Amino acid sequence: MTTTTTVARFNTTRPTHDPGFTDLLRSEWTKFRTLRSSWWSLGTMLVLSLGMSITLTAVFSAQYHDNKLDAGNRLQFQNDTIGLFLQPGSSFGQLGCIVLGVLLIASEFSTGMIRATVLAAPRRTPVLAAKAAVLAGVVFVLAEAIAWICFFAGSAIVRNNVTVTLSTPGSLRAIIGFGLVMAMTALIALALGALLRHTAAAIAIALGWNLVVPGLLGLIPGSLGRHLSDAMPSRAGQLIMDRTEDVSAAYSQWTGLGIVALWTVVLLALAVWSIKKRDV
Amino acid sequence: MTSTYAIEAQGLTKRYGRRTAVEGLSFAVLPGKVTGFLGPNGAGKSTTMRLLLGLERPNAGRALINGRPYASLRIPLTHVGALLEAKSFHKGRTARSHLLCLAQSQALPARRVDEVIDLVGLHEAAGRRAGTYSLGMAQRLGIAAALLGDPRIVLLDEPVNGLDPEGVLWIRNLMKRLAAEGRAVLVSSHLMNEMAVTADHLLVIGRGRLLADCSTGEFIRRHTDPAIYAATPDVAKPALLEEAFMRLTANAVEYSAR
């Protein structure tokens, strides 16, 4: 061993404490908030959700008032007004959630940032968990704000035709459910982005799964078609916002939420396995 | 407790399908000197670095950092800093944000971000989006990220590619300074003249196998034509590295013109 006269001058900057999950959360929040695409996606979610919800509520309310609705729609407007407030917003707002969830992870692969991320957290699972926690937290908070606004704005718009209050059965369930469904949609998109490692492919598949697949499955005749179609996350997620159990739906409200939760857990588990096992 | 070997490879083997990228690679990198990792394109230099850092898992053998596998390091960026491919960051973020999220993951104080920014001379550009950076600035950002944890080991994969002469000189002096601070510096390159004046020790790899593991001076002495070696004054001997390397790796080039 050679003798050196140099004095070791490294490791002079030490961490302030033993890093844990909280530090990963802090790091992921910094990553989230310093990306312009994060804010654009959230903005899209906000505009589409609020816009569609309030517009459709106003349109239906006016048509109801002028007696232009057919019997089926009329009945639904009276009995399931809350669904009208929230479901269109959820359908359209999901676009923002999907783009956000995919971008957060797939952009790390496309830019090569994933290497720095994995070098900083080589066990990999905790950093994916932190990313998921930040994503779900932010989306849930914004989605809940949207849900409450849609509820109060909607109730005000329809007040001359139907009375809807928080004590109307199913109100609270629908409002909380809205936030949960949006957060889980974002997590599903995150999982897809982690599995496919490709932004365009993940967004295309997520949108296709949401918009096209339920319709295709519904073409299968009879109750099988209904059960398969309503088991898709986009359809299942809408069920929690139905006030009364929709007779044409294959599952009850809470079952629908459970189905979305199952999709989320399974896809996230696959994503964790993929991130841990594959080269990066 | 630090082991004598900063970096150690023990029989590293990595295959992609039927192609063997590295085979039975064993070497150690010591602190206090710059170790040059030389080889033709496709020889396995980048693969080896990725194996050392745990980005890929070997088919056989072990890669140890400070005596342990990378994945078992608790605050890894305080052990090893690495610069791999250029521009491996999100173009929409500023240098400061990029470095901050990395620093936060290791519980490093926020002021460390500004310290490394000043260290690499990115102070002027730190608040601009990284997508606006030239290649030289991007390399500086990558090096800043590597030095963020003030690590004992620094791995640099082709750091000089695309740099102007001033940048090349800056990196050369930086690597020497890092080694003088007691760190282990492993730098891979295929630029002979730069390696000749920067590296104290050489690891030469060809077609996935280790071809040489000795000091730079020893390598030149062993692989240069003896007549030429004797005729060259000492001060000019580093310039013989290219010739020595070509003689050794003539049969080990992966891609060559017919």
Image: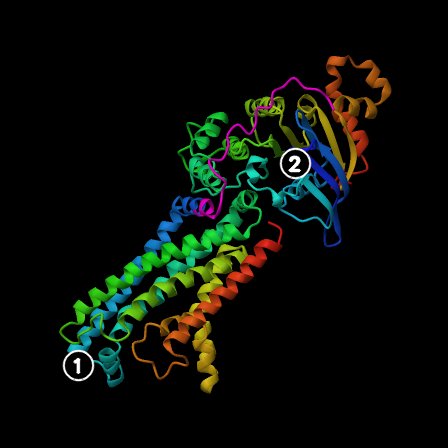
Q: What residue type is labelled 1?
A: Asn
The quarter of the picture where residue B155 lies is: top right
Who's the residue at 71% across and 37% down the image? B8
Q: Distance between the residues labelled 2 and 1?
A: 78 Å
- State the extent of the magenta-drawn residues as a range: A1-25
Location of the C terminus of chain B (image quadrant): top right
Q: Is residue A258 above or below residue B5?
A: below
Going by the image, does B256 lie left or right of A198? right
Secondary structure beneath label 2: loop
According to the picture, the residue beneath numbered tag 2 turns out to be B66
Say which chain tag 2 marks: B
- Residue B42 appears in which quarter of the rendering? top right
Residue B207 in sight from this viewpoint = no
Q: Height in image: A150 above or below B198?
A: below
Q: How is the image coloured?
A: rainbow
B223 lies left or right of A244? right
Residue B182 location (% of width, % of height): 62, 25
Q: Which chain carries label 1?
A: A
* Residue position for label 1: A67
Give the residue at the far front of this rendering.
Answer: B1
Q: Position of residue B171 (x, y in %)?
A: 58, 25
Q: In this view, does A112 lie above or below B108?
A: below
Vertical arrangement, residue A71 with respect to residue A54, above or below: below
Q: How crowded is mark 2: few (under 14 residues within 10 Å), some or many (20 or more)?
A: some
Q: Look at label 2 and name its amino acid.
A: Asn
Q: Nearer the viewer, residue B243 or A188?
A: A188
Q: Which element carries disc 1, helix, strand or loop?
A: loop
Q: Position of residue B73 (x, y in %)?
A: 60, 42
